[in-house]
Image (cartoon, helix red, strand yellow):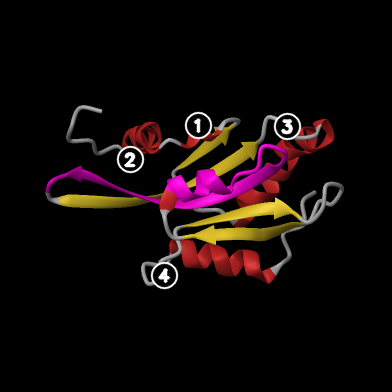
Amino acid sequence: MADLSDPAINEAYLDVRSNKSEINWLLLDYETDRSDKLQVSKTGKRGLIELREALDESKASFAYARVTYSNDKESTREKFILVVWIGSNCKVMRKAKISVHAADVKNVLRVYSIEVAAREKDDLNEDPIVTRLRMAGGASYDGV
């Protein structure tokens, strides 16, 4: 079971969800390689591009992000995604625990439209994610 008791996690989650905050993503990492306690390691204001830069190939992490996109000339939408990151150099035991811990994380970072399983930084390219968000949203005016 993952430990998500740090109050900073909920504070960062509420910041990402708030229209009054510029923070649009958060990254949760484990305190140490052997710990099951998660903590907020980074937050950012520059979207998925900045989040991709923050990911570490040697770690397994969880991220939560607000993605803003246009449906047409008249409207924009904001949707939230949950990212389960397993870097290519992540240790085997951490990889083994990540799926169990993901259920605990989903109980805290609970409101999101899609889950993105990311193994490479390119898995967080914005265009395919926006396409998935449009499909999940049900109202698509551009044939997606």
The single residue placed furthest to the top in the displayed view is 143
> Which amino acid lies under the numbered mark 1 shown in the image of this protein?
Asp
Residue drawn at x 24%, y 39% is: 139
- In this rendering, the label closer to the viewer, 3 or 4: 3
Name the residue that disc number 1 marks. 123
Specify few, some or many for label 3: CA neighbours under 10 Å numbering under 14, 14-19, or 20 or more: few
Marks 3/1: CA–CA distance: 16 Å
Query: Upstream in the sequence, badge 3 or badge 1?
Result: 3
User: Magenta region: which residues?
Assistant: 48-73
Q: Where is residue 87 in the image (x, y as percent from the top left)?
A: 66, 35
Task: Give residue 21's mark.
Answer: 4
Marks 3/2: CA–CA distance: 34 Å
> Which amino acid lies under the numbered mark 4 shown in the image of this protein?
Ser
Q: Is residue 84 left or right of residue 67?
A: right
Please tell me whether mark 3 sits on a helix, a strand or a loop.
loop
Name the residue that disc number 2 marks. 137
* Rendering quarter of residue 37: bottom right
Residue drawn at x 62%, y 39% is: 85
The single residue placed furthest to the front in the displayed view is 53
- In this rendering, the label closer to the viewer, 3 or 2: 3
> Which amino acid lies under the numbered mark 3 shown in the image of this protein?
Asn
Specify few, some or many for label 2: CA neighbours under 10 Å numbering under 14, 14-19, or 20 or more: few
Please tell me whether mark 2 sits on a helix, a strand or a loop.
helix
Query: Upstream in the sequence, badge 3 or badge 2?
Result: 3
Please tell me whether residue 108 belongs to the stretch shown in magenta.
no
Query: Upstream in the sequence, badge 4 or badge 2?
Result: 4
Marks 4/2: CA–CA distance: 24 Å
